[in-house]
Image: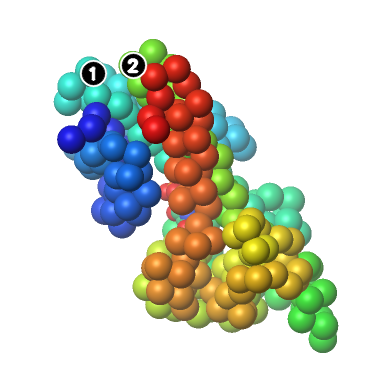
Amino acid sequence: MGRTIWFLTTNQGKVEEARDHVSGYGYDIQQLVVPGVELVEPQTDDLVTVAKAKIEQAVPHLPNPDDLLLVEDAGLFVQALHGFPGVYSAHALKTIECQGMIRLLSHLQSEDPVQEKKLRAAEFQAVAALWDGTTVHIGHGRCPGSIATTAMEGEGFGFDPVFIPADLDEHRQPLSPGDIGAFSAHGKTFGAMKMSEKHLYSHRRRALDDLMTVLSGLPGGVE
Ligand code: IMP
């Protein structure tokens, strides 16, 4: 078994997702829950700053100081709202919920579906931060797309019911909302997809892949 990475999250789904992505690199992912400790998020619009602040607070709770610590922070950035809710996505979900997001964009509609996707452009961004005992390594992931006009529920969580990912090109790289690519959600939201289909587009998966690429470039890094 490779080195243990403790993933600081209360979301078991995220642990499964991370395990799926990084076990091939020889790491063993375990969930780190710190009961009774309320992590403080700094007032900032930058996901990297939030992730680094969480690392700093969680390092003293690592079960073994030689193990690695993973933190992930994500948000939904809506173009017409100048990037809101961004780092405040969890709070926005709790307060206005998916229906509130649809209402905020209700004036942005068009007869032309391509134009409508551009007007309602948004993207999920994720940052995966890994503490290796001396340094914090950062991976970035993004998933461009658009906000649906009606919610489509299913397996997902958070803003999944209202987010339609943009098409991907033949190399599975995301295009701009409205552009036609080799892979398409055909208007389905993340919420209406199977988890396995969401992974094709997921900002979280992309952030973890980027992190693994960063680590493999380091001396003595993963293969
Ligand atoms: P977290 O930092 O990854 O916990 O994400 C913060 C908030 O962003 C969540 O509470 C959700 O509202 C939203 N969010 C992040 N990633 C996703 C996703 O993959 N689907 C839906 N909502 C997400």
- In the drawing, does residue 186 fall left or right of residue 156? right
Q: Residue at x 47, y 21 (%)?
A: 218
Q: Position of residue 2 (x, y in %)?
A: 23, 32
C-beta proximity under 8 Å, tags 2 and 1 = yes
Quarter in which the C terminus is drawn:
top left
Residue 164 in view, yes or no: yes
Report the residue marked by disc 2. 133
Q: Secondary structure at mark 2?
A: loop
Compared with residue 75, is residue 199 higher up or lower down, i.e. above or below?
below
Instruction: Single out the residue that lies furthest toward the top.
Output: 134
Q: Which amino acid lies under the numbered mark 1 shown in the image of this protein?
A: Asp
Q: Secondary structure at mark 1?
A: loop
- Amino acid residing under circle 2: Gly
Q: Say which of 195 and 47 sits in front.
A: 195
Q: Residue at x 45, y 75 (%)?
A: 193
- Viewer-proximal residue among 58 and 17: 17
Describe residue 70's horizontal placement relative to residue 121 as left or right: left
The quadrant of the image that shows the N terminus is top left
* Residue 29 location (% of width, % of height): 26, 41
On the picture, is 109 further left or further right than 184? right
Q: Is residue 64 above or below residue 146?
A: above
What is the quadrant of residue 5 in the picture?
top left
Asked whether mark 1 and ligand 1 are closer than 8 Å, the reply comes as no
Work out whether residue 74 can be spotted.
no
Q: Earlier in the sequence, mark 2 or mark 1?
A: 1
Numbered label attached to residue 66: 1
